[in-house]
Amino acid sequence: MNVNDQVRRLEVDPRTSLLDALREQLRMSGTKKGCDHGQCGACTVLINGRRVNSCLTLAVMHEDDEIVTIEGLGDPDHLGPIQRAFVERDGFQCGYCTPGQICSAVGMLAEVAAGWPSHATADVSAPRITLTDEEIRERMSGNICRCAAYPNIVAAIRDSAEGGPR
């Protein structure tokens, strides 16, 4: 499988989740196991540019897919734009959900750029989606933060979408 632009060869039991393959076989600990039931979003990764809960998909299903984890979005010396915004806006407390939040935010911003409406989109016929705080909250609702850092997470995503802090 292709993980963070590197082809990785794995032999896995067909029942192995992508999450477990990433963490246990590839030793990529950035993607977190929160609930292991697809309810918290801590394990969110990008598969072919779309956000996916890696605990709900089997590793064998992604042989030819491009998988991006938090490790593929930047590193401590070269943070990606959303990672930088999370740091600047203090969009984390304990940090456990942060990798999933950031991967989900990257995917969510791509959905907005592609013009995909959400339940909170005020005008689905508009040529461009206005990324309000309500819109961000709706689109990120699958990612739970047990520390309740939501205002800072929303601010970080808004800043990243707008090109910097307000």
Image: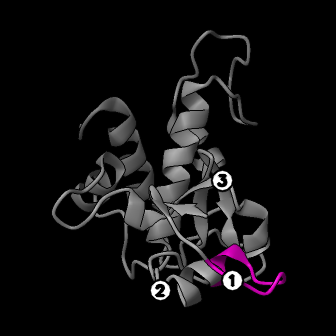
Q: Is residue 55 above or below residue 133?
A: below
Q: Secondary structure at mark 3?
A: loop
Task: Please state which amino acid type lies under the numbered disc 3.
Answer: Asp
Q: Where residue 19 sits: x, y (%)? A: 64, 77
Q: Earlier in the sequence, mark 3 or mark 1?
A: 1
- Between the residue at mark 3 and the residue at mark 2, the CA separation in whole angstroms equals 19 Å
Q: What is the number of the mark on residue 11?
A: 1
Q: Is residue 57 above or below residue 95?
A: above
Which stretch did the figure color magenta?
Answer: 10-20
Q: Earlier in the sequence, mark 3 or mark 2?
A: 2
Q: Secondary structure at mark 1?
A: loop
Question: Is residue 34 among the parts visible in the rendering?
Answer: no
**Which part of the image, by quadrant, shows the C terminus?**
top left
Task: Please state which amino acid type lies under the numbered disc 1.
Answer: Glu
Would residue 105 be counted in the magenta stretch? Answer: no
Please give the residue where the numbered disc 3 appears in the rendered image: 65
Q: Is residue 20 above or below residue 50?
A: below
Question: Looking at the image, which is closer to me, 151 or 131?
Answer: 131
Q: Are marks 3 and 2 in contact (CB under 8 Å)?
A: no
Q: What is the number of the mark on residue 27?
A: 2
Question: Looking at the image, which is closer to me, 51 or 84?
Answer: 51
Seen in the image, is 93 located left or right of residue 61? left
